[in-house]
Image (cartoon, helix red, strand yellow):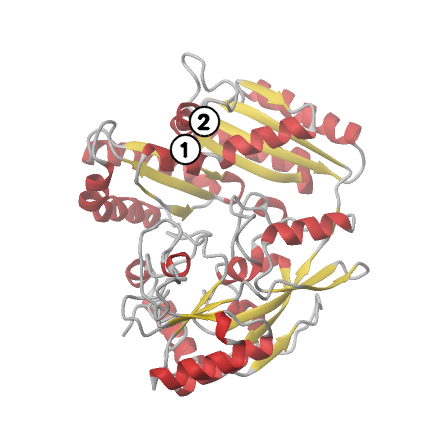
Amino acid sequence: MTTALLDTLRQIVGAAHVLTHEDPTTDLTAYEQDWRKRATGRALAVVRPASTAEVAAVVKACAAARTAIIPQGGNTGLSVGGTPDASGTQVVLSLTRMNAVRAIDRDNLTMTVEAGCILQTLQETADKEGLLFPLSLAAEGSCTIGGNLGTNAGGTQVVRYGNARELCLGLEVVTPQGEVWDGLSGLRKDNTGYDLRNLFIGSEGTLGVITAATMKLYPQPAAQLTAWAAVPDMAAAVRLLGLAHQHLGAGLTGFEVMGQFALSLVIKHMPQLRVPFAGLKGAPPYYVLLENSDSESEQHARERFETLLELAFEDGCVLDAVVAESLAQAHELWHIRESIPLAQAEEGLNIKHDISIAASRIPAFVEHTDALLAREIAGVRLVNFGHLGDGNLHYNVQAPEGGDARDFLATQEDRVNQLVYDAVAQFGGSFSAEHGVGQLKADKLAQYKSPVALSMMRAIKQALDPQGLMNPGCILQKQ
């Protein structure tokens, strides 16, 4: 059966695009290991189709052979959502060859692209048309739009434009039976029954394979200003957020918070980057990076920005601030923020959390959980940063200084996760904001999601994928 399936797959996509361990010169590590190197599996084959018709034929062949499929984009996910298990029986379906921009509709402000299109390509294509595609992530040079939609990715501009879900108007999907649903209409209003598009967005390849999408575009802003502000505590950062909403309105496109220790890792491991204020003695505990986009003029944007900062100084929620004087300076400030995960990786293995809590409750959560972890695990170091504008923190935990990071991860990860996720639940939050559930957190979904919600999710999975062949073990644990 295995030989017959592989022969069929080679007939569909071409022998050069069916990669197996039969060829000793072929290294499948890039497909079989997740980006954080938390899991490594062994695939029966990696199949790389070049069209929707080929995806449909591959899925149909795998369904007939009762062979599980692991859809995969750029493989930059952080929750082990696109990695095969160790059985050697699953097919990794790589969408990277399907990378075409199919159409741009300037009048409708939409762009239709294939699932394997790199996120940065969408941004650059829109920019050449004088338009904006606002989804922006640290991995935008390698992640794909199919993966972004599969995990409902967020990023740095959610406060203005929303998650990937809000940026998508239509999908093309191959079902677990190998049929093609064409929902690429690009309509902003289509109230004709169940919203199938939103069913597949965030489903992490467990209900079908996204092969193309119609995405929203926006006019380019006339001006963009970026500021870096030192704040005395997390409560002050939330007050600043409120002032920014009040005085910038829809012009507030980014609002990031960064803890002093997180930035100290950037200073330590990337000394070429100049971090404002953070290297000074008695540096404040938190910093905010905020961005204002204006559709009128730079002068108008600057006046509003200056008014906001004046009010923030009067309020006491800002201790000091710098405003980027050029686009290059703004990029430097954003580069510092985006370098935190890399600096943390240089410091050693760590425990990552992607949590979401109402912004109003974040100060109390941080105070409670910081104290809890310090009390329970001596010397633990907290790398707290993230998208405060939409209530999403990357509340990461580093081993005590000088300790064995690998041993810390092996002995403390379960305990740390329990403490953090219990606190998140206590404050009415979610343990997964933008990274997805994947295989890594499937047990947490079973623990923290309501039984009613889990029952409905299993019913949807059973209805659409009765054989359970689409990314098994991802989101929902195997029954």
Q: Quadrant of residue 352?
A: top left
Comparing 396 with 32, the one in front is 32
Say what secondary structure mark 2 lies in. loop
Q: Position of residue 277 (x, y in %)?
A: 50, 18
Q: Is residue 375 left or right of residue 456?
A: left
Q: Is residue 167 left or right of residue 403?
A: right
Q: Quadrant of the C terminus?
A: bottom left
**Height in image: 94 above or below 152?**
below
- Check if mark 1's residue and mark 2's residue have beta carbons within 8 Å: yes
**Mark 2 = which residue?**
270
Q: In the drawing, what numbered circle is on residue 343?
A: 1
Q: Position of residue 235 (x, y in %)?
A: 45, 30
Q: Earlier in the sequence, mark 1 or mark 2?
A: 2
Residue under the image location 70 percent in, 38 percent down? 293
Q: Quadrant of residue 156?
A: top right
Distance, label 1 to label 2, CA atoms, is: 7 Å
